[in-house]
Amino acid sequence: MQQPHVCTRNGELSHMGHLKLFSLLSVSSLALLAAGCASGNDIGHTAQTITFNNPGTQTVGAPLTLSATANSGLAVSFTSATPSGCTVSGTTVTFGAAGTCTIHASVAGDGTYAAASQVARSFTVNPAIGPTTTIYIAGYAVTSKSVATADNTLAEEWQLTSGSPTATATALSMTSGMTSAQANAIAVSGSDVYVAGYEENSTSRAAVYWLNNGAATTLPSGMTISEANAIAVSGGNVYVAGYQENIAGSGNAVLWVNGTATTLSPPSGMAFADAVAITISGSNVYVAGVAWNNDSDESAAVWVNGAATLLPMPNGLVGDYYAGGIAVSGGNVYVSGFTDSDADTDTAISWVNNGAATTLPIPAGILFGEYSASGMTVSGGDVYVAGSGLTSAGSGTAAYWENGTPTTLPMPGNMTNSPATSWAVAIAISGSDVYSVGSLMDSTAGVSQTGAYWVNGGEATLLPMPSGTYESWTTGIAVATQ
């Protein structure tokens, strides 16, 4: 718009002209500034930022209330960038499908603040647990951690049920006179849940198992130290595999059946043994573990109805090697484990029917010669193995293999510091869903070890820390379908 030209006779603006021009310029400038604010332009306005923490792994059917703030104090609004899987109404997110959900947080500008840059957060959404399915996880929690005193542990059982986004933790009872306990394995038979482990005090350690969170049942042993490492239930019989040793350190693998102990003699040429995994097929009892001689050379072993066999070392590898899991399906016996070579490197391996060992492929991001396998299961002819390895940064990464194909298990999206470390130790199948359990730690932040689980290779979900404990570990998993 052309401005009015008001002059005196000598060509200068009159006093009235100054006022009119100033008034017109002021109105024009304010209008431009207001238009800039309305359009998100930050000219003449204070910048604002959004703080929107990643909410971490979620579950289908369990709504999430979002929370974010702007440094301006203005209201934050949320929208879903993945509406096919998650939708937003106000601050509530509803999850309709498993996968990845991405939420955008936005704040509009006003007369003081410019519009904030949009912030996006993506996280894993786990499938819902079926209405007739319950997931049970065994482990333990540490009540204190001090250089000057020994750690005290509590045996723990976590339970995941349909419609509940958070697991519940239950501390298992200890026999009078015992000060620490640890759960090493878990099994389900019908509506009964069995957990195997041990209790100890300053002078002894005793193998025990718990039934339905009740009082511990002590397994008989004629030695000072005994541990229960694995448990299975079949035909109404309770089978527990473990280890016992005397005060001099001499001991052997042991199998308890309904509380009666039988020593599992080591394979020929070996002096000692330890049993770590068990499975039952028909009337046959299969136990996996490790045996060693007086030179402390350790080798993986399998017992079938008490008869011991050494498993072969993979071709081209030397050093110690161990069995960590065992499963039987279709008449085939599967064993998982790892090598610990003389060069102090590990390799994940597996065996079928006591045949030649197979090296499992290296999961993405894990160094060659720095990974291992532990628990395993077979479902519908598919073989699943849980394990972990080391990255080039020296941190651990959980993984699992399905029919030999590896999947690296990611940390939670809300764990932002690094390097972070994780391990997977056991695995179970529920319908079409794969549950891996283990532990993780955020080393940069100094966060202690925390039990966790993964579903179908998605981000880890932290298990709740039992009240009054410092850190937690998981050791086993079982699925119950009613």
Image (tube, rainbow, N blue to C red):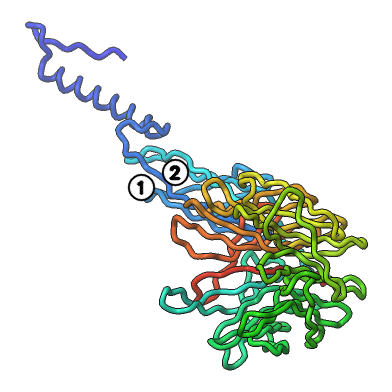
* Whether label 2 touches label 1, CB < 8 Å: yes
Which quadrant of the view contains residue 30? top left
Establish if 313 lies above or below 468: above
Establish if 482 lies above or below 370: below
> Which residue is label 2 attached to?
107
Residue 160, position as x, y percentages in the image: 68, 69
Residue 264, position as x, y percentages in the image: 79, 77
Establish if 96 lies above or below 234: above
Residue 157, position as x, y percentages in the image: 65, 75
From the viewer's side, name the closer residue of 315 and 440.
315
- Residue 333 seen in the figure: yes
**Relative side of 345 to 414, left or right:** right
Spot the residue most to the top. Answer: 10
The number of numbered discs placed on residues in the rendered structure image is: 2
Residue in the picture at 37% in, 30% down: 36
Which quadrant of the view contains residue 460? bottom right
Name the image quarter holding the N terminus. Answer: top left
Q: What type is the residue that disc 1 sits on?
A: Ser
From the viewer's side, name the closer residue of 120 and 185.
185
Where residue 72 is drawn, which disc sits there?
Answer: 1
Q: Secondary structure at mark 1?
A: loop
Q: Residues within 10 Å of mark 2 (few under 14, many from 20)?
A: many
Q: Secondary structure at mark 2?
A: loop
From the viewer's side, name the closer residue of 414 and 113.
414
N-term mark: 2 or 1: 1
- Residue 94 seen in the figure: no
**Relative side of 341 to 189, left or right:** left
Spot the residue most to the left. Answer: 10
